[in-house]
Image: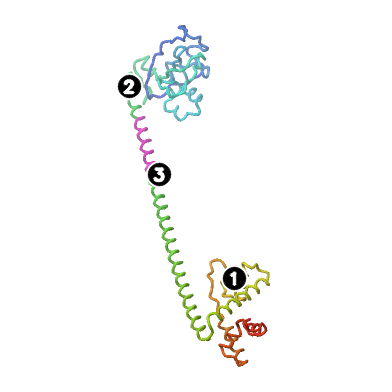
Amino acid sequence: MGRDKGQAKGGKGGAIAPAAASKGSSGTPAQLAVRPEECPICGHDVAVSEEQHILGTCGACAGHPYHIDCVQEAWERVQQKIKVRPCDMFATNGTSQRLPVNCPACKSGVMLAADMVKPLCNSVLEDERCYVYNCPFCHSVEEQQEREAEYLQEQKEAARKRREAELEQHRQEQEQREREQRQAAAAAEEAVQMEATAAAVQASLAAAADRQAAMRQELLDREEAELQLSADALALMKRHKRSACITSLTEMGYSASDAAAAAEVAGCEPAAAASLLLDGGLSGKRPSAVSVIREARELLGEGAKLGLSPTAVEAAERPPASDAEVDYLLSFMM
């Protein structure tokens, strides 16, 4: 023996005698590149009567023995499967899904089958009796068959446990997905509730702002009624105040559109409008009512100094009064 493999331990049984030689497509056996007991992969002899080996059947040459570890090393990429049953990965064994493997012995055929060969105990073969304690080898064909059945049962049990582990993992993954879906649904529902709450708060704030604006407007209407000035006079004063506010802001360097927007929000108060423009607080602000109560009272006070009644002051405020008189009266609004 060129390489001593030693007797392999008992396990799955299989064929003991080599298979008959097959012929090539031309009807004659293919020319072997190795000796009959030589492993075509490593080049060393296989102790077919002593060690566990793989008997590979090629489509062009006779069956040939192979070392198990040689087959394993030749298929390192599938070594995990080969360790369980290397003969199944070494030949097609009637399964068309496996990729064909070239025969290492004749180099021309394709491996069609491969079976595990496990010899009987040498002591039993020679002396018909074994004195080795816990001998790992089979002592009869019946024992080989029993070990074959045990091996198959172990494989079935291992496959069952793998399947149970896969099912358990699948169940855990499914529970995890369901838990994540429930969390996502709860988060989405919470987001919807928060949006609804925010919308309700905004609506409430808007309603409160509307009520405050209505109250300010009502108070403003009462104060304007106490001035004894007509609506036209008050509207003229408001237009003048708005124009003066926009002019003041544009002189400060702001554009006409920004100045007009700030004047609407600040109620045409130049100081408040300039503060809004400086702070950038125009976004989302509502227009404020323009109040000319202070200016009207100052105007009426100046008119009273001139001996003019509110009606006379109003008449002097409008055309066709002289420009000098109107300018004099309106100058008190600034």
Where, by quadrant of the figure, is residue 192 drawn?
bottom left
Given the current orientation, which residue lies at the most extreme front position? 320
> Mark 1 sits on what residue?
262
Q: Position of residue 166 (x, y in %)?
A: 38, 38
Label annotation for residue 145? 2
Distance between mark 3 and mark 2 Cα atoms: 41 Å
| Side of 307 relative to 133 (left or right) | right
Residue 283 place in picture, x, y as percent = 56, 66
Q: Residue at x 53, y 17 (%)?
A: 43
Measure how far apart labels 3 and 1 are at the Cα level: 59 Å
Residue 93: x %, y % from top left: 41, 20
Front: mark 3 or 2: 3
Q: Is residue 21 above or below residue 136?
A: above
Q: How is the image coloured?
A: rainbow
Q: Amino acid at mark 2?
A: Gln
Q: Earlier in the sequence, mark 3 or mark 2?
A: 2
- Choose mark 2 or mark 1, whichever is in front: 1
Quarter of the image for the C terminus: give it: bottom right
**Image-quadrant location for residue 163:** top left
Q: Secondary structure at mark 3?
A: helix
Magenta residues (range): 154-173
Magenta highlight: main SS:
helix
Q: Earlier in the sequence, mark 2 or mark 1?
A: 2
**Foreground residue, 280 or 17?**
280
| Residue drawn 45% across the image and 9% down it | 23
Residue that badge 3 annotates: 173
Of the residues shown, which amino acid type is indicated by label 3?
A: Glu
Q: Amino acid at mark 1?
A: Ala
Q: Is residue 164 magenta?
A: yes
Residue 233, percent from left and from top? 56, 81
The residue closer to the viewer here, 194 or 94, is 194
Residue 211 counted in the magenta span: no
